Image (tube, coloured by chain):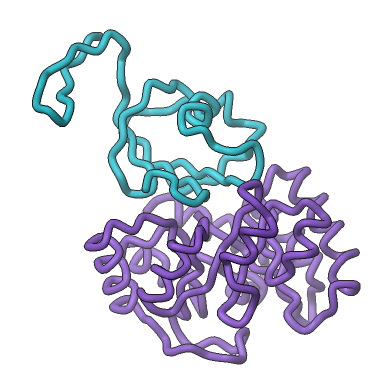
Amino acid sequence: MLQFISHYTDRYTYLDSIRLALEGGCRWIQLRMKDATDDEVRPIALVAQRLCREAGATFIIDDRVGLVRELHADGVHLGQNDMPIREARRLLGDGFIIGGTANTFEQVRTHYESSADYIGCGPFRFTTTKQKLAPVLGLDGYRTIISEMEATHIHIPIVAIGGITEEDIPDILQTGVTGIALSGTVLRADDPVQKMKQLINTVNHE
Amino acid sequence: MPRVASDNTGCSIFLCLYVMNVQINNQDRQTEARNLQDLAIELQLPQKGVAVAIDNQMIPRGSWAQTALQEGARIVIIKAACGG
């Protein structure tokens, strides 16, 4: 399973990046515009949501619970400094996907107990996309978290995130995580659409 | 084809319906569903706010009824408490 997190570069806008990911076959999109206001995000989110609906893709917005409810997006992703998951669930009810960021097993357990639907777990390695960095996990970090989850019977999809390249995917999936979240590695490619196709192929064959 | 299954009291029971073995969120599970739509009903998934992947591939809700389940399929359901 592959989640694409929108980003902008010198070449592409947020919406460009989403169009490219969808064209490459990705069916799980997160719109992440960390430093923008809701009013700046709203028009972009509306177009992104329409593109995702047309493609049959799941559409998640980072951080903005109110906007997710207003636009009827598929769900929200909440970082460590965003609204607590329990509060978001109380506001949104069961009809929305809620994802939470975790860096440790304890955070995974807290999110699970707060009724998160999936966990974005990372960073796998150092990344420039996120400014506030938690310690990098590496392959051993994922192995440890997955084995602690198994020992405590916590079953929730884990999406690995943070500086992941195509070459890393087989090893990361071998640790037992469920999916991969990507951003930069797609947009930095000469041909992002082709790159996304390749990445999906890599994920599907693990 | 009838199958013999054991319940947790150790008694053997005969099931007349063919039961398929699948994995949901890394847990083994048996289902009578033949496609993803029927599985969603069996699991009482909500009408909104749920995403499903089979063998790593996300399946749009509009395609669930046409998506046949295969024995041994690895299914991921992004919805709290699914398979847990």
Write the residue at 74% across / 54% down: A73
Question: Residue A67 location in percent, x, y?
Answer: 80, 63
* Quarter occupied by the C terminus of chain A: bottom left
Looking at the image, residue A50 lies above or below residue A172: above
Question: Residue A11 location in percent, x, y?
Answer: 79, 77
The chain letter corresponding to purple is A
Q: In the image, is A150 to the left or to the right of A39?
A: left
Looking at the image, residue B61 lies above or below residue A42: above
Looking at the image, residue B2 lies above or below residue A166: above
The chain letter corresponding to cyan is B
Question: Residue A22 location in percent, x, y?
Answer: 70, 54
Q: Quadrant of residue B13?
A: top left
Write the residue at 70% across / 69% down: A6
Q: In the image, is B7 to the left or to the right of A74?
A: left
Write the residue at 56% across / 63% down: A99
Looking at the image, residue A20 lies above or below residue B66: below
Of residues A110 and A51, the one drawn nearer to the viewer in this rendering: A110
Question: Residue A123 location in percent, x, y?
Answer: 47, 80
Write the residue at 58% across / 30% down: B64
Residue A25 visible to the viewer: no
